[in-house]
Amino acid sequence: MNTAAPALEISGLTKSFGTTRALEEVDLVVESGTVHCVLGENGAGKSTLCHVVGGSVAPDTGGLRLYGSPYAPRRPADALAAGIAMVHQHFSLVPTLTVGENMRLLRLRDLPRRVARVREEYGLELDLDARVSELPVGVRQRAEIVKALLREPRLLVLDEPTGVLGPAETDALLATCRRIAESGHAVVLVTHKLGEVARAGDAATVLRGGRVSGGGPLAELPPERLVPLMIGRPAGSLDAGLAGTIGLAADGNSPETGASGAGKTRAGGPEPAGRALTVGAAEPGGRAGAGERAGAGGRAGAGGKAAARVTQALRLRDVSVRRADGTSALDEVSLDVGYGEIVGIAGVEGNGQSELMALLGGSLAPVAGRVELDGRDLTRAAPRERSRAGLGVVPEDRLHEGCVPQLRVADNLFLGRLDRFRRHGVLLDRRAMDRAADSVLTGHGIRADGPGALMSSLSGGNQQKVVLARELALDPLVCLAAAQPTRGLDIGAVGAVHSRIRDAAAAGTGVLVVSSELSELLVLCDRIAVAYRGKLLGPVDPAEPDARERIGALMLGARASRSGPENTGRTPEALR
């Protein structure tokens, strides 16, 4: 290895898929001992670039050099042999195996020593006996990263790695990137979060429409210069919620608080842990009550009168869920989501959020409790029945739970609603379906090679847009439950999703948002609860001056307010 040469040199790289030009004349240089960030909107070509470097996609034209030597991989095995490890957006672990069994598939010498080294050097802990299918997506991503590091790569490529990680895990990953760079190797970090770029990166390249729109040392590229390179408009034009979600302060500069987003707990540590609270509609005199937003055309709490409806859009009562190993995932959880209200669920991943979404989607049954939609009991209802009743669900794992990658985009957009395109009750009118799908693609800004493109050919962000567009199109749409709705989305798409969520609430739909992006929840939501050890703590009013600090304390198991319930005696755990 020639350590004086750049770790990776790409020149004139061009790649097309059908009529879609994914990359065009891309030049990029990654220096040894650096973290090089690649930025861009969804569909800008970032993932395609990663696939070319990783050997799973061959370029049409252009060349690559690795540490000064020509590099032309024909398959992923060539990249691995050259010392390149990849962590893609979508998981590669075998879900039916344990974490340890997946690691043994690598067939590496001294595997126990390598696992111990990764744990000691990078602080990445894993339960090797845990079955992958039963892990939260954040832990799965951590396992993917450990799997890549076990190969001791000289170039690590990470494609949107922090989208499914909690605050502490994100901090650990960024520290890992810095350690790898300091060891003399290099990291390519694909991300849309400018706070992460500022904390971990040395240089950046921005892709826009498959071309390089700019780049250079980050010392010369402050956020206010990166944003227009990505989206074509100044950073100052972004609203506070959008700026916070992508890791910018409201003034367009990178925040000093880092990626954690949870704020700091109060001086002196968190308050005593309290019992779980019913997270219901706001009390009189507070912010949004049930139905307050419906028909108001704006945010709740703006003076609208509460509607005279008795039931909530969504109601959970004393719901308990067990994991496959018998442990408690949800413990007597009660939750109300009013018509026209946006309720947020914050918390470190692995505290019951995944099981809550699986419960709402119908793939996980409770051992106790009741789930109601518009007053109707859906506790044992099948997923199709829930959709027809008006419950839209956007799962956190869009690829494996939210879509069928082998089907066309049009088919995925109308899953469960194909009857509207049947002729004589039997044959599908593909032309009518494609026309309708094309209208959705245009309206939601989904970049695809037409309605007939396979879902698997779309970037992760565009797959997310398809899933969200499908659920928003339910008629009726009584309640929308969305997990990580902006995960992996670019700046423009994040803003569009926020607008669509607000529009749905303004039309009277109840909305439940589960997100690890606290800045997003603080701007979008009327109330925020915190998932902790299978319970919901809170709620917290986002309008309160210390809302961020209080939510941060709740993530450590503190009670919701100073006048809340007495300490149950539970010992708060540190965030992992």
Image (cartoon, grey):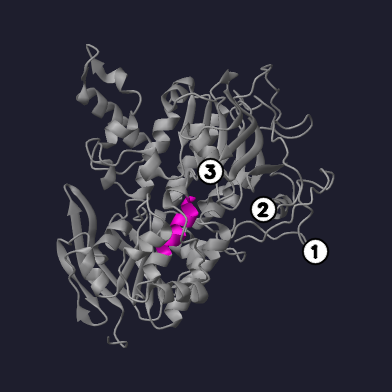
Q: Which residue is mark 3?
A: 323
The Cα–Cα distance between marks 3 and 2, rounded to whole angstroms, is: 21 Å
As helix, strand or loop, the secondary structure at mark 2 comes to: loop
Q: Which residue is mark 1?
A: 268
Q: Is residue 219 located in the magenta-colored stretch of the structure?
A: no
Tell me the kind of residue under disc 1.
Answer: Gly
Tell me the kind of residue under disc 3.
Answer: Arg
Quarter of the image with the C terminus in it: bottom right
As helix, strand or loop, the secondary structure at mark 1 comes to: loop
**Quadrant hosting residue 313:** top right
Q: Which residues are magenta?
A: 135-145
As helix, strand or loop, the secondary structure at mark 3 comes to: loop
Q: Residues within 10 Å of mark 3 (few under 14, many from 20)?
A: few
Name the disc covering residue 555, or none: 2
Residue 473 in the image, given as x and y percentages of width and height:
42, 27
Q: Earlier in the sequence, mark 3 or mark 2?
A: 3
Q: Is residue 139 located in the magenta-colored stretch of the structure?
A: yes
Q: Residues within 10 Å of mark 2 (few under 14, many from 20)?
A: many
Residue 433 higher or lower than 162, as above or below: above
Does residue 545 appear left or right of residue 209 in this picture?
right
Residue 336 in the image, given as x and y percentages of width and height:
65, 30
The residue depicted at 57 percent of the width and 62 percent of the height is 168
Tell me the kind of residue under disc 2.
Answer: Met
User: Which is more toward the observer, 18 or 318?
Assistant: 318
The Cα–Cα distance between marks 1 and 3, rounded to whole angstroms, is: 35 Å
